[in-house]
Amino acid sequence: MTSAIKYGCFYVFLGVSLLAFFLYVYPRYEYDQKASDIAIGFEQAYTGDISGLFTVTPIQNTGLKGERVVFVYDFSVVPEANLERTLKGRAGEKVIFFERPYPALKPETLASLLDRYGIVAGFLELNPVSNFMRKVLLARSKSGREGTFRVHTIKPAEVTNLRLTYEMVLRRWLRAREERSIDFFWVQPLPSSLEVSYDEYGVTLLRLFHTTGSLSPVPVSMNVFFKIMLAIGSFGLIIFYSPVIAIACAVFLSIYGIFNGFADTWLYLAGLTGTFGITGVFREMRKLEFNTSLKYIATIIFALFLGVTVNALSYSHESVTGLLQPHGVKLLTFYLPMLVFIREFISYGLQGLKSRLHWSDFVLVIGLVLAILYSLLRSGNDAFVTNFERQLRDSLEMLLGVRPRFRELIGIPALWLYFRDKHHGFGRYAFIIPVLGVIGLCSIVNAFQHVHTPITIIFLRELLGIVIGTAAGMLIGVFLPAREEGESV
């Protein structure tokens, strides 16, 4: 491919990404504002004022009915033989499905029953039923699917098992409101060990949130021609990286779209665009000979614009509500860092380690293996989180308001040091610095894959991570020697 065609494809994407920034970000902000109010429901044990609120009750409770009642279908309580009869008795009502589903129940069967009886389903996140209900709700009719409301709750057993304090519980509600498109809070009583009454708990939550008496999700709309334009720009960027990979992506997405539908295919295109786009631009930036600070700034800005494009490509009712989840998360997380590691290690890392092995080399290897394993656990859509990390998150949020991502707090300083040629100051382990740097760079793009997070929160978090990371990189760079003549990035 000629250089003119290659860079022409890049400029096509650049133009599309600029349009996406100006045509998508503000409408998305408006959507987030409209969807920001929370409906709150309490169980019958709550004795406070519930005017304008909802009552949450087991579906087998025959004493309640109406617009402000949300029923809970607990698979561990209701016998499977009573499934259809129970749903028929709640025709047209709001129902949250809870706990692990019946082993023999097929998603298509439950979807058919929900459509038949006009059930308005609540999608409960982070629960044993969540993955099953994703399949159920995706199998529903369009009208049934679009009526889905997203639910968050904190179970008493969860508080006990995770050893959460009252402040940590409140922080989890705040995080759910800020980071995920939640429509409904189902407030369950706290365990007695926290010594906080249900009524006191409810009053505190009602002070924290602006509530709404409506449980109607805000419609998600996206112009189809705008999406086609985004797709053209995305393929232009992948061609810029590699025409062969672009052809492979086109074939894969065509086949995948036939069998899985276009809504899910957009998410795959977004993941592939993010992965190969950031890789291609980083490769070209390394080659350019101009001011290193400008190279660093340009790379960061491009990552933000690429992230906006990825977010716009992924935007749909199914992705905002979490029925469809991001694709290519692990590919984006590891593809570029792996390539950089191989190149840097072969270029000068191997040479530095050819000398006699030191005990620190074994510590480094063990640390890298543990870091990779932890990253694998932490990446993806259902990430493992340690209790220590929960406490650290809470502390950062209380201190900064919005929690920056850990990968950027580590990676962005390393990226600054790499572009400023300061990484050689780490001696035989200098090859690790660019790897950490591109991990931070990929993390910026990955943040925008989380379509359920309001766009302003994503921007605030990324800008905070970039500013803190750059400042940390500058500070560390003061104590490191500049590269010697003849060395290059």
Image (cartoon, helix red, strand yellow):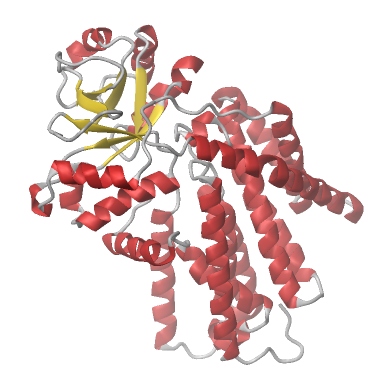
* In the foreground, 437 or 242: 437
Asked whether the viewer can see residue 204, the reply is yes
Q: How many marks?
A: 0
Q: Position of residue 484 (x, y in %)?
A: 71, 92
322 displayed left or right of 7: left
The residue at the point 72 percent across, 45 percent down is 22
Looking at the figure, which quarter contains the C terminus?
bottom right
Tell me if residue 390 comes above or below residue 181 in the rendering.
Answer: below
* In the foreground, 399 or 19: 399
Q: Quadrant of residue 31?
A: top right
The residue at the point 61 percent across, 34 percent down is 266
* In the foreground, 406 or 365: 406
Q: Position of residue 306 (x, y in %)?
A: 67, 51
The residue at the point 74 percent across, 29 percent down is 225
* In the foreground, 151 or 381: 151
141 displayed left or right of 388: right
95 displayed left or right of 77: right
Asked whether the viewer can see residue 74, the reply is no
Tell me if residue 204 comes above or below residue 343 in the rendering.
Answer: above
Q: Position of residue 458 (x, y in %)?
A: 53, 52
Q: Position of residue 363 (x, y in %)?
A: 39, 80
The residue at the point 26 percent across, 28 percent down is 51
105 displayed left or right of 214: left
